[in-house]
Image (spheres, rainbow, N blue to C red):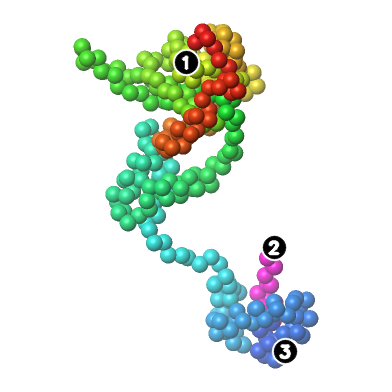
Amino acid sequence: MPAQRLTMRRIRELLRLHYGMGASARAMAREHGVSRSTVKEYLARAVAPGLTWPLADELTDGVLEERLFAASGPRPGRCRRVEPDWAAVVREMKRPGVNLTVLWEEYSAAHPGGYGCSRFCELYREFEHRLSPTMRQHHVAGDKVFVDYSGKTVPIVDRLTGEIAPAQIFVAVLGASNYTYAEASWSQALPDWIGAHVRMFGFFQGSPRPVVVPDNLKAGIHKPSFYDPGANHTYARMAAHYAIGILPARPRKPRDIRLWPKLSLGFPPRDRGCRSAAAFDRPSPDNLTRRQDL
């Protein structure tokens, strides 16, 4: 812990004893109850700005402190690249359809000599973590699958009539590997919700060992609650059929869903990492409960 600074009155007394009376550093240290190195440090600070005794009348305590300790604070550095407005970047990230790639391209177009994409993303995550610190979650392979609708839609064009209808995007992510399944459905109603789960289990060639973690949409959870959530009757029967549990995320806590950062940041895993993680978390007798009647 850094030592507490002497008051301006005691510093003035040190200057008077040293310059006015020629007292030694040892004697002043003994009189003021501080170490000799501390006395020498304050005297050296007085030499740097050219202070002499007697001090000028207009040299108030505030001005004296500024002259003695101006160089002790953080020194402003020189930034080699234009720093993005991170607060504005955070606001833009909350808009639908916006990801870090789009924001970096806009930044790069405005500042060609700025940060590269990887450094831009790294600095953004550091800034975001300072705003809302979170705890890292560790998942066992095949232990949980996180399911939700992405909140975005894709337009589907009828080739016969030309009519355009929006389709919902169902996404499921295995916790340990980020191995992902996604499909489009016409709505978020119960039949589409249950059907998406059945096709998801078929894609994973089994069901996760203990639980599925959904968001609190009405098709799956009719009673959102932290202590006693209530699952839809049909959804609960489907879980009983596949011998799995349903553990909804906390209400109004989107970070509980594993796929939230994947969808919001817009950065899928690299191909190499995706293949290795998928192989690690693919169905096996050790991490998935196989069902013959998918």
Label ID, residue 219: none
Rendered image quadrant of residue 290: top right
Q: Name the residue that disc number 1 marks.
A: 202
Q: Name the residue that disc number 3 marks.
A: 23
Q: Earlier in the sequence, mark 1 or mark 3?
A: 3
Queried whether the magenta region covers residue 8, the answer comes back as yes
Question: How far is disc 1 from disc 2 in space, using C-alphas?
Answer: 60 Å
> Mark 2: few, some, or many residues within 10 Å (few <14, many ≥20)?
few
Q: Earlier in the sequence, mark 1 or mark 2?
A: 2
Residue in the picture at 65% in, 74% down: 8
At label 2, which amino acid type do we have? Met
Q: Name the residue that disc number 2 marks.
A: 1
At label 3, which amino acid type do we have? Ala
289 to the left or right of 5 = left
What stretch of residues is rendered in magenta? 1-13
Between label 1 and label 3, give the one nearer the viewer: 1
94 to the left or right of 59 = left
Q: Nearer the viewer, residue 177 or 68?
A: 177
Residue in the picture at 38% in, 32% down: 96
